[in-house]
Amino acid sequence: MKKDSEPELEEISEILKAMAHPARLKILEGLMENECNVGEIQDKLHLPQSTISQHLKTLKNAGIIKGTRDGTKICYRVIDEKVRKIIGIIEGK
């Protein structure tokens, strides 16, 4: 293995760690189909708002998603192309 690939492998490892939770995978699958806010995610996953916010924070800190303010709401979307490919593979696309 090349030493120059280590930083990239560490980055990929961090992304996979952030994705490695069933609720976060569901959130990412949903965001791939449609940008949405915490309330919409809560309605679909039936999880407490605080739990969803924690998962979104983890994904945001990993650079996987980005939130855009729309009035009083923040609309989230997947911004990492590697993650889009991984979710596509998981979904069999």
Image (cartoon, rainbow, N blue to C red):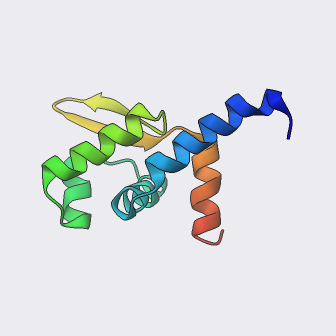
Left or right of 47, for residue 27:
right
Q: Quadrant of residue 86?
A: bottom right
Report x, y in % for residue 19: 46, 52
Which quadrant, please, contains the N terminus?
top right
Q: Residue at x 19, y 29 (%)?
A: 71
Which quadrant, please, contains the C terminus?
bottom right
Q: Residue at x 61, y 61 (%)?
A: 88
Report x, y in % for residue 31: 42, 52
Q: Residue at x 43, y 59 (%)?
A: 25
Q: Would residue 43 be seen by someone viewing this image from the given angle?
A: yes
Q: Would residue 37 be seen by someone viewing this image from the given angle?
A: no
Report x, y in % for residue 41: 26, 56
Left or right of 44, for residue 83:
right
Q: Nearer the viewer, residue 18 or 71?
A: 18
Left or right of 62, for residue 76:
left
Report x, y in % for residue 3: 81, 30
Q: Nearer the viewer, residue 72 or 65?
A: 65
Left or right of 4, for residue 23:
left
